[in-house]
Amino acid sequence: MWAMVRRLREDGVTIILTTHYIEEAEAMADRVGVINKGEIILVEGKAELMRKLGRKQMRLELRAPLAALPESLSRYALELSGDGNQLTYTYDNQSDRPGVASLIRDLETAGVQFRDLDTKNSSLEEIFVNLLRQEP
């Protein structure tokens, strides 16, 4: 069935998909509508929705464990893993928080070295759950 839906979509056919399986919607949709308690609360292009409401997370694997975060990094609201080997920075495009470039500079200034970094964007499901939490 999904192969047929993909072919129709590729042919330019408009498909209205209702699902509780958000992974399906994320894989198939160009536009997303959210209905809560029988009311449409949002209709948006998927890419625009992800840009506006999504969050990003950057994880840094440190070269040496930290016992605590240096005070000079407190403005970033970083999370230090329990073993001190990983820092996590969560941010979004709409935020006034300092950016990734300034974090990297400040890490270097503080003498915190990392061996690897990984970034992750919010999934459509995470955005959906956060959106419904905000609804009255």
Image: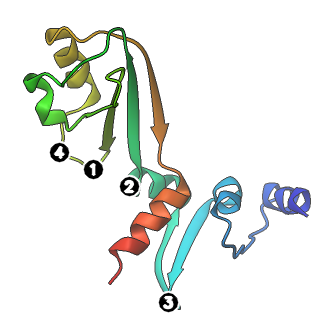
Give how far apart the Cα atoms at labels 1 and 4 are.
7 Å
Residue 96 circle label: 4
Specify the quadrant of the image occupied by residue 112. top left
| Disc 4, SS | loop
- In the rendering, which numbered label is found on residue 52? 2
- The quarter in which the C terminus is drawn is bottom left
Q: Which of marks 1 and 3 is nearer the N terminus?
A: 3
In the foreground, 113 or 125: 113
106 left or right, relative to 15: left
Real-space Cα distance between discs 1 and 2?
7 Å
Give, as a three-letter code, the residue at label 4: Asp
Is 87 placed left or right of 50 in the picture?
A: left
Check disc 3: other Cα within 10 Å, few if <14, some if 14-19, many if 20+: few
Image spot of residue 63 (x, y percent): 36, 8
Check if mark 1's residue and mark 2's residue have beta carbons within 8 Å: yes
Residue linked to disc 1 = 94
Judge depth for marks 2 and 3 and give the one in front: 3
Which type of secondary structure does the marked residue at label 2 adopt?
helix
Residue tagged by mark 3?
Answer: 37
Q: Earlier in the sequence, mark 3 or mark 4?
A: 3
Mark-to-mark CA distance, 2 and 4: 14 Å
